[in-house]
Structures are given as C-alpha cells and as structure tokens.
Amino acid sequence: MLQTTRVGGYSDKPYDSLNLGVFGKDPKVIENIEFLTHKNSLPHSPVFMQQVHTDNIVEYTSIPQKHGQFQADACFTRQKNIICAVLTADCLPVLIADKNATVVAAVHCGWKGLFSEILPKTISKMKVNPAQLQCWLGPCISYKPYEVSDGFRQNFTTKDKEYAHCFYLDAKNKWHADLKKIAVYQLQQLGVKEIVQSPYCTYDNKGLFYSYRRDGETGRMASMIWLS
C-alpha cells in the first residue's frame, strides 16, 4: 500500500506540489504520476476512478484503460499487480486487505458514501469473512474543523441511534462530525477486528496535506493498495 502527501512533486501553487488530482486544472499531474510510479516501483501507473460521492463499486479484473473510465467511489480486485486507488483532500480513504492476500479494496468515504454505507457494501462484494480483514483509515479531516448542521447529525442518528457518539457539540452550540468514528463503527458492526488509523488531520497539517475545506481550489492525495 502507499499513501501520498502533498510533498515532493512538480505542481505550482495552489497545487504544490505532489498533486495527483487528474480531474482538475493542474498541468503537472501526469508528470507527478510518472514520478510517483518510478520512485516507488509501482506495478503500473495508477489509474483513478471518477469519484462521485455514491455507493458505486467496481471490480478491477484488468488495469483500467484511462482515468475516469469508471464512475465509482470504491474499487476492489482479486488480481495481482492491479492498483486500487482513491483520491482525497479531506474525505476519508480506507484501504482493505484480507489476511490471505486474495483481495484488496480502496474506498473513498465522504459523508455521503458513509451514509449510504459504501464500506459495508464493498466488504460484501469482497466475499471474505470480515474478521479476516485488515483495514487502514488514512488521513482525513478531523472532527474539530468539520462543522455540520444539526439536520446532518439527525440524518445519521435517525438511521442508527448509535451514530450519536460520532458527533460533538462545541462551546458555540455547533455540531462536528467524526468521519473516522463513523467508519470504525460500521466496520466493527461487521466484525472487522484489525483497524489501523492514521493520526493526521488534513485540515490541520497544511504542509503535508491538501484540504478542500481549508483551501478550496487545491490538489489531491492518493491512497493505493495492490496484491503483489
């Protein structure tokens, strides 16, 4: 697996510098992808889905031919040396592998994807006992800068009252959502036992990560996993 930061590429501001956002306006993205591929000896140049904040899931049986070939927010494969990857700049990337190395997945978890339960749906398609899975939750926006409405919170708690522990009320009576807690709750409900979380907040670490909520127009990091 591989998690990128914004450091070490060729892009100019506001995308500086290792921007991998292939669907944006940055002319240096392809150069960044080529650099990343060679530097890390990747099995092939990563190809990215057009992420649309849905519960669409695609299985890769071969390497996708082009960026945006699939409109989806999760991909998985049982084939060796095919990279599953997602792009983020505040949303939560989740990488999944089974202990027997027969299937891997990459999931883009914005709030819409989490609400539509893209994580459980992806794991269902992987057809592996969840207790045999290892999950990695990458850098995303933490709850402190992620202010949401009470209606937003109620959408989750109406669906499942246990989501209440994933929201925090601040001193100004504003609600904040914890994407990682929502994801962890969903994974634990399935029986996933091995969950590792990145400690980084994309919003708070401007030198390391892109953040759409902080900066607006900005780049994208990639989270990748493959079977070798």
Image: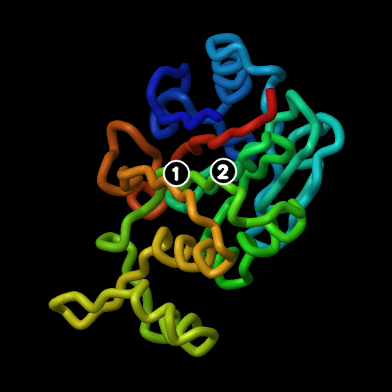
| Residue 180 screen position, x and y as percent | 41, 58
Residue at (63% x, 34% y) in the render: 22
Tag 2 residue: 95
Q: Quadrant of residue 170?
A: bottom left
Up the image or down, 39 lies above or below 151; here it is above
User: Which residue corresponds to mark 1?
Assistant: 138
Q: Secondary structure at mark 2?
A: strand
Extreme-bottom residue of the structure: 158
Residue 147 x, y percent position in the rendering: 32, 69
Does 89 sit left or right of 22 as displayed?
left
Horizontally, residue 62 falls left or right of residue 209, namely right
The CA distance from mark 1 to mark 2 is 8 Å
| Residue 72 picture location, percent across and down | 72, 53
Q: Are marks 1 and 2 in contact (CB under 8 Å)?
A: yes
Image point (36%, 65%), residue name: 178
Q: Residue at x 53, y 62 (%)?
A: 187
Circle 1 Cα neighbour tier, 10 Å, few/some/many (<14 / 14–19 / ≥20): many
